[in-house]
Image: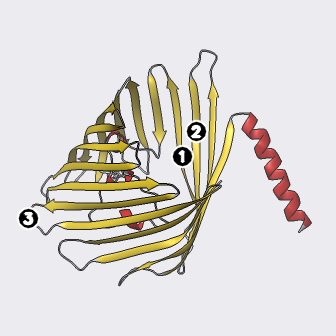
Amino acid sequence: MKKVLFATTALVASAGFAAAQGIEISGSAEMGYAGGGAGVTEGFFQSVDVRFSMAGETDNGLTFGAVIDLDDSQQDNTNLTNAFADFTVFVSGAFGTLTLGDTDGAMDWAMQEANTAGSPGSLNDAETGHAGYEGSYLDGDADGNGQILRYDNSFGDFGVAVSIEMGADGTDTLDTGYALGATYNLAFAGGSVRFGAAFQEAAAVSGNGESAAGISAALAMDSGFEATLAFTDVQIEGGNDYTHTGLGLGYAFGPFSLHANYGIDNVNGAADNTGYGVAAGYDLGGGADLLFGYGSGSTAGAADIDTYSLGLSMSF
């Protein structure tokens, strides 16, 4: 025990020293129970995440830095996933910000997802895991191992971004992807609306390329009410094109946060994908939250798949 205590004390001391040099350490942990309907793993759920944020500044005011996200240690009743690290590196100045790594492409950066409407989240992301939810758009379709280069900048209430994602090797189905995005924030008495518009394309090495275009609007009221509406048109060469519509609603009052979302993929020549999700949170204070999430959806007319989770989320 003494050796463990000494090692822990040394780590804390070094972390405090590092923070003074432009390095910050933060983390999160989760514990609870997750499950669902037929075919869904059910049992105890736990995860641990550690994040290192590093930043510096040149003599002429140019900011640079990196973020390393160590995702554990996610464990349920059947397996323990291997630890892995997501990381980004950035340079920022009056010209804007250039980011490389596991970051959002310009379309995901500009578009507002249904889950942004006041969702407290859940342990297993049950509220966004259903078949009707649209999240990262075409990010990752170029199989670039999470490596995206994005430039973004803001001018008052306007924001713009452009990104490129390259395939990891010549065997990727989709080799190179790029995206363009723009945002506009409209403030008014009692709230604001953030508009987004974007286009994304992933070129094919062999087979079919794909592209997506979308618009979104996110309403945030000072009263605690939030709403998001997004529409996306996805074109697949030689495949089933589809349009996606997503709606999210949220309301926060006191320590409580409530959220619901619904999404549908209208697929040409096939049955639709639909689903909905709900999430609820109670802020216990000090970085601890009690979270519940539920999602249900069906793909191409198949039976619904349900997932849920309940437990404690901790931020450090």
Image position of 316 with respect to 277: above or below: above
30 or 23: nearer the viewer: 30
Q: Which residue is mark 2?
A: 66
Q: Pick out the residue farthest to the bottom.
A: 38
Does residue 22 appear left or right of residue 294 in this picture? right
What kind of residue is marked 3? Gly
- Look at the numbered discs 1 and 3 and tell me whether their residues touch, using CB distance below 8 Å: no
The answer for how far apart the CA atoms under marks 1 and 3 are is 40 Å
- Contact check, label 1 and label 2, Cβ < 8 Å: yes
Q: Element type at marker 1? A: strand
**Sooner in the amino-acid sequence: mark 2 or mark 3:** 2
Identify the secondary structure beneath mark 2.
Answer: strand
Residue 115, x across and y down, in percent? 37, 55
Residue at mark 1:
87
Give the amino acid at mark 2: Ala
Residue 284, quarter of the rendered image: bottom right
